[in-house]
Amino acid sequence: MINHKVKVYPSKIHLPKKKQLAWKIAEIASDNSKLRKESIEMVINRIIDNASVAIASLNRKSVVSSREMALKHLRKNGASLFGVNSKLKFDCEWAAWSNGTAVRELDFHDTFLAADYSHPGDNIPPLLAVAQQNKKNGLDLIRGIITAYEVQVNLVKGICLHKHKVDHIAHLGPSVAAGLGSMLKLNTEIIYQAVQQAFHTTVSTRQSRKGEISSWKAYAPAHAGKLAIEAVDRVMRGEGAPSPIYEGEDSVIARILDGKNAKYTVPLPKKGESKKAILETYTKEYSAEYQSQALIDLAKKLKNKISSLNQIKKIDIYTSHHTHHVIGTGANDPQKMDPNASRETLDHSIMYIFAVALEDGTWHHVKSYTKTRAKRKSTIKIWRSIKTHEDKKWTRKYHDPNPRKKAFGAKVIITLKNGKKITEEQDVADAHPYGSRPFKRKNYIEKFNTLTENILSKKESKRFLKIVQNLRNIKSGHLDKLNIEVKKSILKRNSKKGIF
């Protein structure tokens, strides 16, 4: 790995193209490095994971709306839509839009946390859609996904967006563009321009994940993927991009992030070095913000240590800066304590999540978020007794560069009415790669079967799982076999008319 120093240069100083971060990203995207067996297997895990959460969300409002939009963009020899008959094809950017929304809707796929946040699985829908439309093979798709993960994970390690309230999809645009470049075997110059265009067009604010969180949280990554596809298309036709997009005097870094004195370090593999960042990512066992995963496990264990939850006086959670300020009381969002809040808001409230997990001793992607569940009096009582605190020890663990030491957990102190205190802490979720029971292929398949039960036929489920596990051998023009069909009668429709 090489640690690349990134800073702003005034316009009077010409920064050579080959010294720019976008060029260095493009170089590794076009280097055709050897694919690691472990990385290939993890790509398959992630495609299974994405499919499971996408099928489970097919009839949720935002997914139905995105599908209606995509259905208006039929294209012969295009890409497929989750749930829809695979014989029907659509413009790849609209397939990416709809499928990306379905993947993101439940907040239930993979994650990587470092200087910033990310859900690297968001790279897969746009890459798969373009691969289908362009008749690529399984290995082409695998290469593109591995590159996209490499770029996004390392940008997330090096550049914090949240500090300036910029949404994390700003790292997703460049990673999708780089992944497409690898998959389509584009040259370094084209990928360089596409990365810059994609970054320039995907910068937006974190209001999408603040206050009353709306369905845009699900749409945002899909939108970034769609914009990246369009950026690559433009550049392939000979168009250029704002440059240098990272280091320029009026660039994103200079005007939106740390400013003209900014200094960032972004690690990237050497040219020709195998890419393995996908192995540092981790999926979710529970449908909730990743920083709550270890706390759900913790709550389930604590339930067995308290004879009566009525005896709880207060609960204090000591955790990292990010957890406290994003999903804890440090966010200062009254909506995170509101029983009438949207599902999107509740899955970003560690107070709600911990209270429900403590009461129920389990977590369910639907039942744990129902209006009835959120309004239960006993839940509200525990919920409103919870306060989070930043603990510098946990913040250091959160940012530890060693994947084996990096932690996203907390210490919980439950104070009972009689003054007794029950204390427990946990570094990572049980399902984390370094947790007590890390997710393996069988766990991904089990998650898929659980989430798609009563939606998919057993025949279709078995067909998909067999095909996807043979991904590296899928021939050119046959990637539509990764689509999953459901009965037409199952899919809900949105009768409201739009522009299309």
Image (cartoon, rainbow, N blue to C red):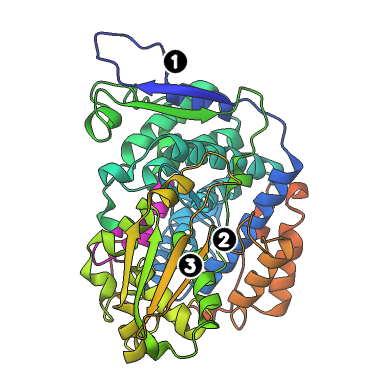
- Between circles 2 and 1, the one closer to the viewer is 1
Mark 1, Cα crowd under 10 Å, few <14 / some 14-19 / many 20+, is: some
User: Where residue 483 is drawn, which disc sits there?
Assistant: none
Amino acid under label 3? Answer: Leu
**Mark nearer the N terminus (2 vs 3):** 2
CA distance for labels 2 and 3: 23 Å
**Amino acid type assigned to the residue bearing label 2 in the image:** Asn
Query: Taken as a whole, is the magenta stretch helix, strand or loop?
Result: helix
Disc 1 marks which residue?
Answer: 19
Q: In this view, does 445 lie to the left or right of 361?
A: right
Looking at the image, residue 35 lies above or below residue 459: above
- Residue of label 3: 295
Tell me, yes or no, whether the two marked residues, 2 and 1, touch with CB atoms within 8 Å.
Answer: no
Q: Within the magenta stretch, is there residue 138?
A: no
Q: Name the residue under label 2.
A: 50
Q: Which range of residues does the magenta coloring cover?
A: 209-226
Task: Indicate yes or no whether the magenta region holds residue 223.
Answer: yes
Q: Position of residue 298 (x, y in %)?
A: 52, 70
Locate residue 335, reporting x and y percent: 24, 71
Question: Which three-letter amino acid code belongs to the residue tagged 1?
Answer: Lys
Residue drawn at 51 percent across, 82 percent down? 303
